[in-house]
Amino acid sequence: MMTGHFGQIFLLPGRSLLEKEIKRLQADLLQAVFEYDELIYKDCFYLEKHFYFNFGKEWFSLLKAHFQTIYLERKYGIMRRYKNNDQKLRLQQLEKDLSVYQQLITKTEEKIQSAELWIYEDKLTDEESRLMRGMYRQIVSNVHPLLYPLQTKNQEALYQKALTAYKRDNKEILQLVLDQLNEDYAQASPLKLSQLVDVRNTLLVSLYETRNQLAIRRSDFPYLIRNYILNDNLGEKMRQSLIHRRSQFTHKINQLELEIAKLKER
């Protein structure tokens, strides 16, 4: 029994019911968290590397053409409307405003180079991958911060160590973390009834947010175009689409450069 706002009194569910619901929520959250980590650190990582390796050059060329088109369109507009020093200042500001595009192009080039190195690295076998997934899932089920919101900082640090090892395919570190886990690592002592209520509410929120993040990432790059990345026929269609779009931008760039040249001659 607890007292709420304005002196209202309401009954809490019994300890056994709360503990049972918490275990159910933890099981559901474990599945959601594990799926999310698999999606982000394995599936999407793999898909992104293959995208930049197989389609990176076409994508990079398209981005550069897109950036150049935007730059010339705005430059042409400034040159038509402004003269002398005012024009010079606005063109300088244009360079600053579009610096974010240049950063995107630079980052894309780095991703292409990284993919070209990664694709030839030694990879885990299917059996090694299954073993690592099993080890990581066991660790998640014991010390993931979302599953155990009242755990200690040392336990959270242990999970972060496991996550880093999982992302890097480091079986030795994962095994080391497993060896450090105690059978009853999650909670050292029984919780008060009010604490159980707080844990239940926290788990409900975490489950909703994790499932929501899963849905968002599955509707975003690179997972959204996974079929095009993994299927040769669909991949070729995407490549031709990128090339075609690049040619459209090239045509627009040529037109804008001619118009800008005419303005300079006036």
Image (tube, grey):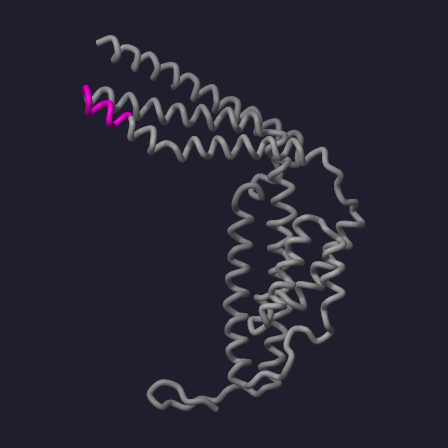
Q: Position of residue 61 (x, y in %)?
A: 51, 24
Residues rendered magenta in the picture: 83-91
Determine the residue positioned at 57% across, 41% down.
222
Judged by its main secondary structure, the magenta piece is: helix
| Residue that protrudes farthest toward the front in the picture | 154
Would residue 257 appear left or right of 158 to someone viewing this image? left
Q: Position of residue 204 (x, y in %)?
A: 52, 70
* Residue 188 drawn above or below residue 75: below
Q: Quadrant of residue 52?
A: top right
Q: Quadrant of residue 148?
A: bottom right
State the residue in front, 151 or 221: 151
State the residue in front, 231 or 265: 265
Determine the residue positioned at 62% across, 59% down.
160
Q: Position of residue 47 (x, y in %)?
A: 62, 40
Q: Position of residue 68 (x, y in %)?
A: 40, 23
Examine the structure image and report whether residue 49 is included in the region drawn in magenta: no
Please state, as top left, top right, bottom left or bottom right, where the C terminus lies in the image: top left
Determine the residue positioned at 72% across, 57% down.
174
* Residue 206 drawn above or below residue 130: below
